Amino acid sequence: DSLEINETKLWQHKISLLVLSNMRFNTKVLALFAASLTTSEALVRKSKLKKKGVAKKGHIKSVLLLSIDGLHYSDLVQLKKDPVKYQNFNWLMDNGLTFPKHKVSTWADSFPGLSSMLTGAGPGNSGLLYDFAYSRKLVGPVTGTGNGGTDYNQPTGIQCIPGQTENLGWVIGWDESIDVDYENPNTNAIDSTYLYQAIDPEKLPRDPANNCNLVYPHNWMVLNTIFEVAKGINGAKGIEKSWTAWTDKNPGYEWVNGPSGKGVDELFNPEVSSFDKKNIILNKEYDTIKLNAILNWIHGKKRDGTDFSPRKDVPPVIYGGNFVILNDASKYLDLSPASPAIGADYVPGTQGEFSPKLADVFQYLDGNLGQIKDALVATGNLEETMVIVTAKHGNSPIDKNLLHKISVKTSNCPGNGGTNECSPASLLLNDVTLSPYLANYIEDTVSLIWLTPESGSYCKTPGCDKTADAVKLLLDSMGTGNPAGIFKIYSGDHLFQLLKANGDLAADRVPDILIETLPGVVYTDKKKVMEHGGFSTDDRSVALIFSNPLLKLKGMSNEVASTHEQIAATILDILGVDYKQLQGYQVERADPLSVY
């Protein structure tokens, strides 16, 4: 019967206590009355939740997906130790389900990490291998060079002939290199002229198989996304009159629209490279700009606070974005005085303890989460919103004592008079026989290497494939001091098995060679102490929290293991949408996680 206490009865209790307090009653009696009042108030609050019951499939109306880039599971362990300083992280964990064994399934970088969450498939099938990519089927831009033309001396302004099958292959930068003009001359301040960029069509590649049309980021997609399925695009059975929103770090993330180009109703991608990313103060300003967009979406508004038609004041069905400050702040230490407050690192030799500056970064992020929670409460959307906190990737090594930086310059390769250590691609570039066959490479805490279409795994002329020769050179280097810090080499069928690659779905993008590094190895000549992109636990073991105050399951998930690909199906399942409509699910069968 006590659960039936209502607001009227509660105020009757309060009035009684006031009357009693003006009478000469024993203080113990007053204390007992006060205790009963406190109990009654708690029961009223509890009864309000009980009326709505625990969350079930279909109860959730919106999913808010947040990527705090660089957030490890081990960071959650540290955050849990101080529930006062990091109260909002702790609130989400206490009112949700945390997955302690969650990992990014392959190498951990921004594009493959996010695309796995949005498509339900890994990079081998989604084709989103890195933001700096390569295709064996495309030709270059009409006039612009992008990073490809600049860095790899590829011809620009070349003719594109519809249906051509020769002279193909292009390095594609889906990063700031396709912006109209991102280079802010004053990198120590955020200038809206450079922050709000547009894609420059003259910097986009062209597709001979599609009448030489320009390839925008969404054209690069081969699988549909959760946004498209939720909205019912291309025949999917979604949610009527729903809308979607997303914010990320540069215009190249336009690919989140999916192949239709229509998956996200409001896409807000301010350019992160328009200011000094090593400046924590500017990082906070930048992330706050995106936070404000998310807060307006919670209120059912456009990112600038204006009304969104036709669903005025109704939040998006799927929305969210990323915060970059943790990733940027923890990667750089030894920097110029013009970059204030840098040095947000982990304490060396510990299990990921925060330095004071890193603690400040987490307090800023905790404040962001607090504002999001407050907005959900204020709008009455808290109990109908599933908040997911995760990361596209981690960063490694957490312990700087394990850091082993290896140069990406050929001048440092063995025998050239330098450090006698250089990256795998540098070893190949340093070889006069093999260097002409390199088409593209990406190296951070991983090494992805593409050979030219005429000399790689997909060439058709007998004897043309130089992959085995390149692999042999790298294997031989491992036996002579291992100057590239190689742990494992993947190529051919072995690589396709690793990627779960399904036939020709994204075969034109898959590298010929992939290198897994030894722990702690970072390929860089910059002043970095952490990076991501690889296979290490620090790169791949990221946070994953599903939070809603009505969840029956709370605490630590007993899932044996979980991967980013499962997040896509889980989001649609939570919303009551058939996740089997995801083409990525049809290929990889990454089932929903148990959150109810």
Image: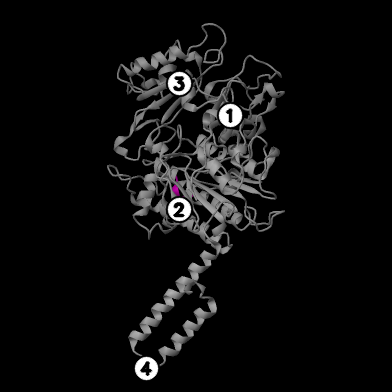
Q: Which residue is mark 1?
A: 146
Q: Disc 2 to disc 3, how far (Cα)?
A: 39 Å
Counting from the top left corner in percent of width and height, residue 442 is at 47, 27
Q: Is residue 163 above or below residue 196?
A: above
The reply to whether residue 343 is in sight is no
* Badge 2 element: loop
Q: Is residue 356 above or below residue 184?
A: below
**Which label sits on residue 553?**
2
Q: Which residue is mark 3?
A: 494
Q: Which residue is mark 4?
A: 24
Counting from the top left corner in percent of width and height, residue 429 is at 44, 17
178 sits left or right of 39 in the view: right
Return the disc, 2 or 1, that comes first in the chain's sequence. 1
Amino acid at dot 4: Arg
Q: Residue furthest bottom?
A: 24
Return the disc, 2 or 3, that comes first in the chain's sequence. 3
